[in-house]
Image: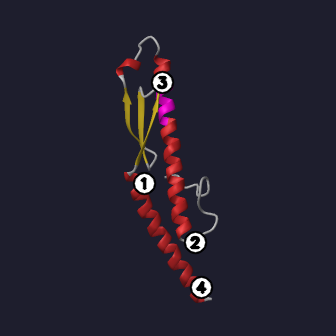
Amino acid sequence: MNKNIGQLLKQAQKMQQKMQELQEELGRKTVEATAGGGMVTAVVNGKQELVSLKIEKEVIDPNDPVMLQDLVVAAVNEAMGKVRQLVADEMGKLTGSLGLPGLGGPGGGGFPF
């Protein structure tokens, strides 16, 4: 029985190390999304941080700030959705490679990074 506990601890340590490596790797990856036919572009990294926002001057209308606000929100939300999918996919690969059932795939990990 002690041998099984030792193996379990080794596997947990291996997973912890792989998770840390994955978090670092995801922090270096970015996804991009646009709104308004490319007039607003949001770039989000794997840590779910907005790292860049580009707004074309043609979309800036002082008489209609709500439109610009809506485009920014749409671009950021789309980029966040893409990065959440990226994280879920990468987590699925990690947990699948470790042979841990029930911990991967879309919506399976719930890891907020």
Q: How many marks?
A: 4
Q: Quadrant of residue 58?
A: top left
Q: Residue at x 63, y 68 (%)?
A: 101
Asked whether 75 falls inside the magenta stretch, the response is: yes
Q: How far apart are labels 1 and 3 at the CA level? A: 28 Å
Residue 45's spot in the image, x, y percent? 41, 46
Q: Residue at x 43, y 58 (%)?
A: 23
Amino acid type of the residue tagged 1 in the rendering: Leu
Q: Earlier in the sequence, mark 1 or mark 2?
A: 1
Secondary element at tag 4? helix
Please rate how many residues cluster around mark 2, counting C-alpha atoms within 10 Å: few if below 14, some from 14 to 19, many from 20: few
Q: Residues within 10 Å of mark 1 (few under 14, many from 20)?
A: some
Which of the two discs, 1 and 4, labels the residue nearer the N terminus?
4
Instruction: Reply above or below: 66 against 94.
Output: above
Q: Which residues are magenta?
A: 69-76
The residue labelled by disc 4 is 4
Type of amino acid under label 4 = Asn
